[in-house]
Image (cartoon, grey):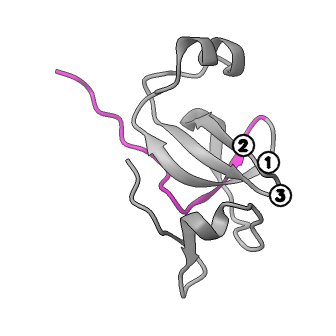
Amino acid sequence: MEHIQTATFAPGQVVRHRRFGYRGLIFDVDAMFSQSPEWYEMMAQSRPSKDRPWYHVLVDGETHTTYVAEENLELCGHTDEFDHPLLSSLFDMADNGDFASRVSVN
């Protein structure tokens, strides 16, 4: 029987990368690693687990996105003034200040 991992974070949550310190906004979640073995060898230097959730993240103040293992993220309390060019195409601001996804993802 296959063991299904439950994601700790969800689209619309602001997180901080534990190692690199940047703030990010989750816009998609993969139940497990879904990039190529070559990508993992080149980019995942800390060799995080491939069997735990991975997240697609908008990087605050930048124009790129990242793909991050759950173990490298923590919830960030600073959620206002998020800046990314894809923000308005992926999210609406909810009445309570949260980010509400505009698109259906995994």
**Residue, x 63% and y 70% (percent of image)?**
88
Instruction: Let me know if residue 88 is in the magenta part.
Output: no
Q: Is residue 69 visible?
A: yes
Q: Which residue is mark 3?
A: 61
How far across and down, in percent of the image, does residue 100 sit? 50, 72
| Residue 82 place in picture, x, y as percent | 74, 67
| Distance between the alpha carbons at the discs numbered 2 and 1 | 6 Å
Q: Is residue 45 visible?
A: no
Percent position of residue 105, x then y: 41, 53
- Labels 2 and 1 touching (C-beta < 8 A): yes
Disc 2: CA contacts within 10 A as few (<14), some (14-19) or many (>=20)? some
Magenta: main secondary structure: loop
Q: Position of residue 73 (x, y in %)?
A: 63, 42
Seen at 47% across and 69% down, the residue is 102
Relative to 72, 8 lies left or right: left
Disc 3 on helix, strand or loop? loop
Amino acid at the residue labelled 2: His
Q: Nearer the viewer, residue 77 or 31?
A: 31
Looking at the rendered structure, the kind of residue marked 3 is Gly
Badge 3: how crowded within 10 Å, few (<14), some, or many (20+)?
some
Q: Residues within 10 Å of mark 1 (few under 14, many from 20)?
A: some
Earlier sequence position, callout 2 versus callout 1: 2
Q: Residue at image x 57%, y 44%? A: 56
Which residue type carries mark 1?
Tyr
Question: Residue 92 falls in which quadrant of the image?
Answer: bottom right
- Residue beneath disc 1: 22
Q: Which residue is mark 2?
A: 17
Residue farthest to the left, as pictured: 1
Which portion, as a residue range, is magenta? 1-19
Q: Secondary structure at mark 1?
A: loop
Q: Is residue 59 above or below residue 79?
A: above
